[in-house]
Image (cartoon, rainbow, N blue to C red):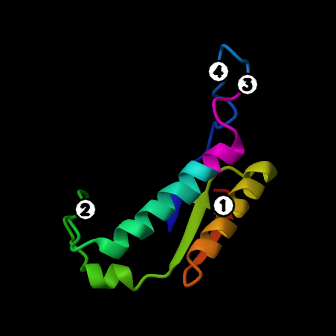
Amino acid sequence: MEDKSAEGLLKNINPKTGKPWQTFESWANKQVYEKTYNRIKALEVAKSTRARLSDGLIPDISNIRDVRKLQFHILETDIELQNAVHNEIQRLKKEFPDWEFSARFGK
């Protein structure tokens, strides 16, 4: 599961334009599509893993490569954000057809 907040996305206003710093589409593109795309591509060439800071566990790279499901948990529930996230998930599904992507919205 990939936790994403998106809280306050429209509350952070650019004082010069009076508009939000980010649109739902730009946020979803960066936070869902680009970061996931980069992680999957890096996983294809990774030679090893490293310990997580919180618990020191080191998962074997072969175990991680076997994972083919990813669910995004997004705290915000705005319908425009949901549409933007689903659009990026569709892009990921086209790019990585052997993966299963989904999203859950709300707390």
Q: Secondary structure at mark 1?
A: helix
Precedes in sequence: disc 3 or disc 2? 3
Q: Quadrant of residue 65?
A: bottom left
Residue at the spot of label 1: 88
Q: How far across and down, in percent of the image, does residue 71 sit?
A: 57, 70
- Check the picture and name the quadrant holding the C terminus: bottom right
| Front: mark 2 or 1 | 1
Contact between labelled residues 3 and 4, with CB atoms less than 8 Å apart: yes
Residue 20 within the segment the image draws in magenta: yes
Residue on which disc 3 sits: 19
Alpha carbon distance from label 3 to label 2 = 38 Å
The residue tagged 2 is: 52
Q: Earlier in the sequence, mark 4 or mark 1?
A: 4
Name the amino acid, label 1: Glu
**Which of the marked residues, 1 or 3, is nearer the chain's N terminus?**
3
The answer to which of 47 and 71 lies nearer the viewer is 47
Secondary structure at numbered mark 4: loop
Mark 4 vs mark 2: in front = 4
Vertical position of residue 25 compared to residue 53: above or below: above
Residue 14: numbered disc: 4
Mark in the foreground, 3 or 2: 3
The boundaries of the magenta stretch are 19-28
Extreme-top residue of the structure? 16
**Height in image: 78 above or below 32?**
above
Q: Amino acid at mark 2?
A: Arg
Closer to the chain start, of discs 2 and 1, is: 2
For mark 4, does the 10 Å Cα neighbourhood hold few (<14), some (14 to 19), or many (20 or more) residues? few
First-in-chain label (4 vs 3): 4
Q: Amino acid at mark 3?
A: Lys
How many residues crowd around disc 3 within 10 Å: few (fewer than 14), some, or many (20 or more)?
few
Residue at screen point 53% across, 73% down: 70
